[in-house]
């Protein structure tokens, strides 16, 4: 999916996207060497970082923000996606979304129902996937942010968009 107009993005998602654009070199993609997490401390609970392994293409969870853990995401730092999400159909949906950013070298965005099960309180989420390439060309990591929209009657978070946002 293409990115919506920035004013249609959740402020946390938009802030990470704008940070990625700010660290973007004049030529090629930014790499992890350009990304300093201390520059975005208020976004970190919603940030997650994937390493991209190749041959075969796989995704390794390097960092998981606390908002994702609090929302009940079944994946944890130090796992490959295929280990964390054994249901093949769900995993294929997640992988297709991630692969698009790897193949195109362009951001990907989605808002809708979670692909994988989170707490029953999560009604919807918004996610942005931002490609990183140490050499400026070959995507070797994905910098991501997710915010959660909670059901109004039983949400555990402090506001409508969930914890950390």
Image: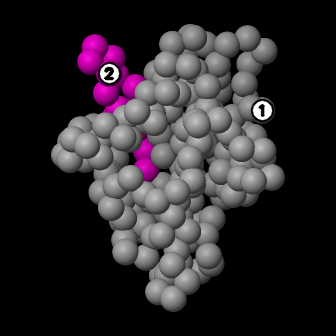
* Residue 75 visible in the displayed image: yes
Instruction: Tell me the tag on residue 57.
Output: 2
Decide whether the magenta segment is chiefly helix, strand or loop. Answer: strand
Which is more toward the observer, 155 or 134? 155
48 lies above or below 156:
above
Quadrant in which residue 143 is drawn: top right
Residue 21, image x, y percentages:
74, 32
Q: In this figure, what is the number of numbered marks?
A: 2
Is the image coloured rainbow, by chain, by secondary structure, or in one colour?
one colour
| SS type, badge 1 | helix
User: Which residue is at a point 45% across and 70% down the rendered structure image?
Assistant: 122
Quadrant in which residue 88 is drawn: top left
Left or right of residue 137: residue 26: right
Quadrant in which residue 2 is drawn: top right
- Residue 63 located within the stretch drawn in magenta: yes
Residue segment shown in magenta: 51-64
Instruction: Tell me the tag on residue 141.
Output: none
User: Which residue is at a point 72% across and 24% down the rendered structure image?
Assistant: 24
Which is more toward the observer, 47 or 129? 129
What residue sits right under mark 1 in the picture? 22
């Amino acid at each position: 999916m293409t990115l919506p107009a920035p004013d249609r993005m959740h402020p946390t998602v938009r802030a990470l996207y704008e940070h990625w654009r700010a660290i973007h070199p004049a030529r090629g993609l930014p790499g992890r060497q350009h990304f300093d997490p201390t520059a975005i401390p208020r976004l970190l609970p919603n940030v997650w970082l994937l390493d991209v392994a190749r041959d075969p293409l796989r995704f390794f969870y390097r960092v998981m923000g606390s908002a994702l853990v609090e929302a009940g995401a079944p994946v944890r730092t130090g796992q490959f996606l295929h280990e964390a999400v054994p249901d093949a159909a769900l995993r294929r949906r997640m992988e297709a979304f991630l692969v698009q950013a790897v193949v195109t070298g362009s951001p990907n965005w989605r808002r809708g129902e979670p692909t994988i099960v989170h707490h029953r309180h999560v009604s919807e989420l918004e996610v942005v996937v931002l490609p990183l390439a140490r050499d400026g060309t070959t995507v070797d990591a994905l910098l991501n942010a997710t915010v959660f929209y909670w059901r109004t009657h039983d949400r555990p978070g402090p506001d409508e968009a969930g914890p950390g946002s």
